[in-house]
Amino acid sequence: MAKKSKSKSDERTPVKPPGMSQERFERLVAETKSPFKGLRKVIYGAVLASGLLGGFVFFTQLLAGKNVETALPNLAVQMGVIGIAVFLFWLEGRGQRDA
């Protein structure tokens, strides 16, 4: 059987350039492993805020008894959005601990 050969990119490990602090080097290596993590967290936060605001609006409509037949499915959608955003935040945190 033929062995699977590794590509050069698999074999290379990052080397700290002279004059760069170890902390900055580690931060740059972490960024290459999971790019745009900060941007993703901002987007997840915006989606979560949107879901919470929408959920509040539809919940108050249900309490007031206005448009119950449309408010209930919309509230369910907002709860789904909140659940997805929380799950994505959880995945980001889990990936950070595993690294």
Image (spheres, helix red, strand yellow):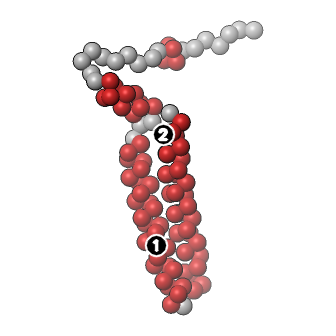
**Front position in the image: 62 or 97:** 97
Question: For the residue labelled by badge 1, is the local secondary structure a helix, a strand or a loop?
Answer: helix
Image coords of residue 72 (percent x, y):
58, 79
Question: 16 above or below 91?
Answer: above
Q: Of callouts 2 and 1, which one flags the residue occurring earlier in the amino acid sequence?
A: 1
Judged from the image, the secondary structure of the residue bearing numbered disc 2 is: helix
Question: Crowding near pointer 1: few (<14 within 10 Å), some, many (20+)?
Answer: some
Q: Residues within 10 Å of mark 2 (few under 14, many from 20)?
A: few
Q: Nearer the viewer, residue 97 or 50?
A: 97
Provide the residue designation for mark 2: 96
Residue 9 lies, in percent from the top left, at: 48, 17
Toward the viewer: 27 or 68?
27
Q: Is residue 73 left or right of residue 55?
A: right
Dividing the picture into quadrants, the one containing residue 2 is top right
Residue sitting at x 55%, y 61% = 83
Q: In the image, 35: left or right of 1?
A: left
**Mark 1 sits on what residue?**
54
What type is the residue that disc 1 sits on?
Gly
Residue 20 vertical placement versus 8 (above, below): below
Q: Residue at x 48, y 39 (%)?
A: 96
Q: Could you say where residue 74 lies in the image, as x and y percent from the top left?
A: 55, 75
